[in-house]
Amino acid sequence: MVEYVDVVCDLVYGDCGKGVVASQLAKTGNYNLVARWAGGNNAGHTVYVNGKKYKTHLVPSGVFFGIQSLVGPGCVLHPESFQKELNYLTENGFDSSLVKVHPSCHIVLPEHIELDKQNLAAKLGTTSKGIAYAYASKAARTGVLAQSVLDEKLLWRDKLAGIILCEGAQGAWLDQDHGYYPYVTSSTTLPYGACSIGFPPQKIKNIYGCAKAYDTRSGEDPIFPNSLLNDPLLTKLGELGEEIGVTTGRRRKVNWLNLDRLITAINLTGSTEVIIRKCDILDQLGVYRLFKMGLMYDFKTFNQMEMFLRSHVLASCPLVKDIRCTYSPETL
């Protein structure tokens, strides 16, 4: 029986450190299972273990801490890429046998990748991983299930039990229903999607919403125009923050934090714990700015900016219990 579930989600466009947050939670030893509920290898997670950085694309972060890790039924999986990740884990001394795939997870086929490259990569800035077309096949009832393709030893056959940690992919504003369509991903990025793992929503206890002290975006989006790449100060901010996509290697577009959109996302996701990461990057730049109600606010120190942010979030987001601004890339 499932005791309760914690969920880690992204409050912006992805790339806000869900992997770090999930791995630090997993490190506590409180969880029996770490599960991923959506997306495929179009996402990337950065995890720190004993000060060393590891990068994954589909595998949940529990495996780095000896915890069973599940690729859920709402995900899509490219078998060859998945096997490379398992090999990567083994080569780095981790027990890849802890990673299992739900039998109903759908398979990304070669034709999905080719269609993505031909039709979506240039238009929408997709990762050319075939994700959209795998989900399209699933919706059309023509998809291929993991249980038809993968070795039995890779499949999850257990019942959910104990305390579970669910980690999302991408971010709130890439959600298929709530993002700026069609500049979205192909799955549900919001925490309710975690229930697809196989538990009722009443089991969700804590929702950890992740953001950065500034905004970033990969892919095409008129709200986040490519012209941002030409702003010298934002370019410097991106360089200091090492804003390069884990999966694509693409330079991310950077802008100052939009506090109104952040507050909307916090309420949309029902986040109870808000974690603002990379605050140290603003200190390195020496510039502290955010947008509120269409106006840009400048602050002399990050402490001033944090107080402003904290007061507005707490006043507008009744479900929030705590806000943490972090400086180390390896911690909450």
Image (cartoon, rainbow, N blue to C red):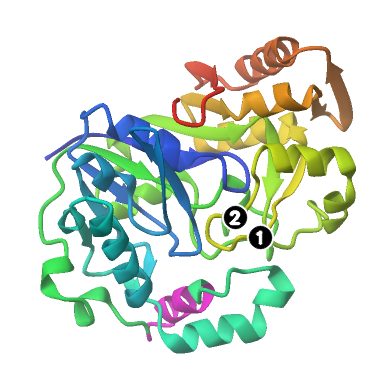
Callout 2: SS: loop
**Contact? badges 1 and 2 (CB < 8 Å):** yes
Q: Residue at x 74, y 10 (%)?
A: 304
Q: Is residue 213 above or below residue 52?
A: above
Q: State the separation of the CA atoms marked 1 and 2.
A: 5 Å
Q: Residue at x 64, y 86 (%)?
A: 118
Q: In the rendered image of this protein, does residue 70 appear above or below residue 149?
A: above
Quadrant where the image shows the C terminus = top left
- Whether residue 202 is in magenta: the answer is no
Instruction: Give the vertical position of 174 relative to 134 (above or below).
Output: above
Res 104 seen here = yes
Front-lying residue, 233 or 61: 233
The amino acid marked with disc number 2 is: Gly
Residue bearing the label numbered 1: 250
Which label belongs to residue 245? 2
Q: Residue at x 20, y 57 (%)?
A: 96
| Viewer-closest of 165 and 268 | 165
Question: Dot 2: within a 10 Å radius of its alpha carbon, few (fewer than 14), some, or many (20 or more) residues?
Answer: some
